[in-house]
Image (cartoon, rainbow, N blue to C red):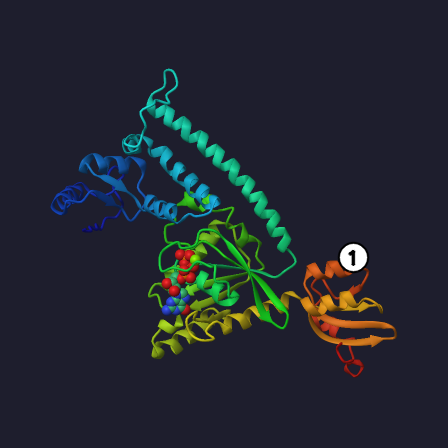
Amino acid sequence: MGSLTQHIDRPNPATYLGKGKIEELGALISEKDATLIIFDDELTPAQGKNIEDATGKRVMDRAELILDIFATRARSSEAKMQVELAQLEYMLPRLTRMWTHLEKFRGGIGMRGPGETQLETDRRLINHRIKLLKERLTEVTRAREIQRQGRRGSFRASLVGYTNAGKSSILRGLSGARDVFVEDRLFATLDPLTREVDLGENNRVMLTDTVGFIRKLPHHLVASFRATLEEVRDADLLVHVIDASHPQWEEQRNVVNGVLDELDIHDKPVLHAFNKIDRVAAETLLPLEERITNLLPNSVFVSTLADGGLEPLRRALLVKTRALRPIAEIRLGAGEGRLLAEIHRLGEVVDQRTDGAVLVLRARVDEALLGRLRRAGASVNGSNGTPDGVAASGAPSDRLVDLP
Ligand SMILES: Nc1nc2c(ncn2[C@@H]2O[C@H](COP(=O)(O)OP(=O)(O)OP(=O)(O)O)[C@@H](O)[C@H]2O)c(=O)[nH]1
Ligand SMILES: [Mg+2]
C-alpha cells in the first residue's frame, strides 16, 4: 500500500527508524488505512515491540515474512517440522509481543499449570515443542543418511542457487522427471529431490535439487535446513545455478557463496550454470559469456526453455563424471557372462581384449560396481583414483576383440 525508506548511519536500537520517521510511518498508515507493517530487515525483539506500541499496528520483519512464506510452501512432514522449528525459535524471544496475536486463537480451556502466568506456560510449551521437533528431525536425518548411503558409489551432484534461478527446471529438463515442481515464485522447492540423470554412454549422475537461498536468509532457517542441506555437503560436485538474465546475478551469486560458507561447505568442485540465457538480449550475451568465462572458467550457459538448451550442462557433467570414474582394468574368467553383462550395462567400456582364457576389459565403472566385481572374484586394477593413463598403457589396440 505504501513504502518508506530512511538513510541513517545506524538503525536506532530502540525503534530501528529515527523518531521523526516513526511519526511519518504512523501518518502514512492512517492515510493508507494499512493493517500491517513489514520491515525489509531483521528487527530485534525490542524494536518490533516498540514500533508496534508506537503505531498500534502489527509489525513483521524480513525474517518473519520469509518464515511465513516457507510455512505456506512446506508440503512434506520434514519441511513442515523444519519450518515450525524455525518459527518457534524465532518466536521465543518475542513472546511478550506475539502473545497478543496468539491470544486471539487461544481456545477457552486454560492449559496453565499452578502458579504460572500465561506467558510462562507458553514459554514452557514452546520449549517442549522445540525439543520434540528437534528429536523427530534427528530421526529423519538418520533415515536420510541411510538413503544417501545407498547412493554412495554413484556420482552425485547437487543443484544450489538463489531462489527462482531455475534449479528445479534444470533437474526436470535433464532427468525428464515430470514430478519436479517448478513455479515462478520464491521458495517453490523446500525438500531435496534426487533423480537419476542419464548423461549418455552409460554415465549417470544422481542429481539433487535443493532449497533456494535468498539475501539475508533468517539464520533460524539456515539452522533448521542444515539436515536437508547435508545432501549438498555429501555431493561430489555442486552445480551453482545462476539466473544470467537477472540484473543482480552477481550479488545473488555472492549470497549463495555466503550461505555455503555459513554451512561450512568449502572446497567442493563447483560448476556454474548460467541459466535463462534465452532471456538475455542477443547483443549482450556474447560479451557476457566472454566476461564470465574469464572470471569463472568452470561455467556453462544454458536455458531450460530453448531446444537443446541444457546440452552444455549435460556435456560438462559427462566430463566430470568421467573424471570421477577412472578407467579400471578388469579381468574376467570364462563363464562370467553375468558380470560382463553388468559392466556393459552400467559402465563405459573403453576396450576389451583376451589374454589367453581371460577377458580383459578397460572400463569406467563407479565404486559401487567395482566393489561388486571384487566381491564376485574378478581381478580389478586401476581403481581408487588411478589416473586414466596408467591403466591405458597396457592395452595394445591390436588385441582388441569384437564386443559380444
Ligand atoms: N526464460 C526462462 N525461464 C526459466 C528458465 N528456467 C527456469 N525458468 C523459470 O524460472 C522460474 C523458476 O524456476 P524454478 O525451476 O522453479 O526455480 P528454482 O531455482 O527451483 O526456484 P526455488 O525452488 O524457488 O528456489 C519458473 O517460472 C521457470 O519457468 C529458462 O531457462 N528461461
Ligand atoms: Mg525449485
Picture layout, residue 256 above or below residue 21: below
**Can the viewer see residue 347 in this picture?**
no
Residue 88: name its quadrant.
top left
Q: Is residue 122 left or right of residue 103?
A: right
Residue 165: name its quadrant.
bottom left
Q: Nearer the viewer, residue 319 or 148?
A: 148
| Ligand 1: image quarter | bottom left
Residue located at (38% from left, 28% from top): 123
Residue beneath disc 1: 375
Q: Nearer the viewer, residue 198 or 117?
A: 198
The x, y position of residue 161, in whole percent, is: 44, 59
Q: Nearer the viewer, residue 52 or 35?
A: 35
| Crowd rating for badge 1 (residues with CA inside 10 Å; few <14, some 14–19, many 20+) | few
Quarter placement of the C terminus: bottom right
Residue located at (39% from left, 54% from top): 187
**Can the viewer see residue 234 in this picture?**
yes
Give amino acid for label 1. Answer: Arg
Q: Is residue 286 left or right of residue 54?
A: right
User: Is label 1 within 8 A of ligand 2 (CB to nearest ligand atom)?
Assistant: no
Picture layout, residue 322 above or below residue 49: below
Secondary structure under the numbered disc 1 in the rendered image: helix
Give the farthest residue toward the right: 356
The x, y position of residue 313, in whole percent, is: 51, 70
Picture layout, residue 298 above or below residue 44: below
Residue located at (25% from left, 37% from top): 14
The x, y position of residue 111, in whole percent, is: 37, 23
The x, y position of residue 146, in whole percent, is: 62, 47
Give the farthest residue toward the bottom: 398
Q: Is residue 40 left or right of residue 146?
A: left
Q: How many marks?
A: 1
